[in-house]
Amino acid sequence: MKYKVCSLFKLAFDPLHYVCWERRENILPLAPYLLAIYPAVLLYKSARWLTRETGRPYPCNMSAVWEKPCTPPVLNLDGVHVWRAQLIASATEVDVLSGCLSLDERERADRFAHAKHRARFVVARGVLRQLLGRYLGLDPAELGFDYGEHGKPALSSGELQFNMSHSHEMALYAIALDRQIGVDIEWPRTTVAYDQIAARFFSMREQAALAERPEIERRAAFYNIWTRKEAYLKARGDGISAGLDTFCVSSDAEARLLHSDAGATELARWNMTALTPAPGYVAALCAVGDWRLNCYAWSD
């Protein structure tokens, strides 16, 4: 931090350094002009330095900052925590995580034909148990799950709510207290026939928004819509039975629920946000009410 502060002052005083030392000119006649432009110079050069340092404009979107906490974070009633985890792990790590799975989960893992997919399933479920165990102060292997009518998992008891999603090599976990929540992550694939999928599953308004986009932006807009619809449906817990064309979400950078056949009350009930877990991935989070978001990176 000391280095950064010193660097900012150095950048701001570069014009004075140039006039006084490089040109060897008398600074006094120029002092009023230099003092007048000094705030603008400081702002411009500081912004340039911060952008170079972080690789993005500052301040950045809160969902783009994934912290690695040294101690388990505290989850408050008004908070939502989202964790990202890499699904690539060594054989030893997979064996350790497999040890905390239930018999049912291990049987599901064994049904995968490819070892790669089996390992990713084990890691995804193992990390979920590790996370929930830390929040609850329980042995991850002792956690019990119930499944809703449409397959949404939930803890057998308590007010801790969660949802998970995984794609390619990454998983996301959304955790909240006594709050319906849903999350979705996708790794966009060039082979997906998104126009055909949109025609079948998107509302007319979403299809129109997609068609209005330039071809170069259409695939990104498609995945924005898809992840937001998935996150909303998963938060509700009723799956596609609710009707994919009975509601509409945004396709631009800001995630929003734009329309619901259930009316204005349903729109006011939910909030959603886009997530940027890693380059190349598209993700969205949806939860009831107003909440504060914190994003974390799983490193164990």
Image: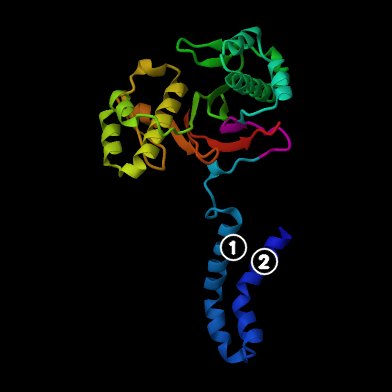
Mark 2 residue crowding within 10 angstroms, few (<14) / some (14–19) / many (20+): some
Residue 210 lies, with reference to residue 31, above or below; the image says above
Q: Determine the secondary structure under disc 1.
A: helix
- For the residues labelled 1 and 2, the Cα–Cα distance comes to 9 Å
Say which mark, if any, is on residue 207.
none
| SS majority, magenta | loop
Question: Would you identify the image quadrant in which residue 239 lies?
Answer: top left
Q: Is residue 75 magenta?
A: yes
Residue identifier under label 1: 49
At which x and y percent is residue 248?
33, 30
Q: Quadrant of the C terminus?
A: top right
**Residues at circles 1 and 2 in contact by the CB criterion of under 8 Å:** yes
Q: Is residue 98 left or right of residue 80?
A: right
> Which segment did they paint magenta?
68-85
Residue 7 lies, with reference to residue 137, above or below; the image says below
- Residue sitting at x 34%, y 39%: 218
Residue identifier under label 2: 7
**In front of the other: 120 or 62:** 120
Residue 295 lies, with reference to residue 157, above or below; the image says below
- Residue sitting at x 47%, y 38%: 274
At which x and y percent is residue 11?
62, 70
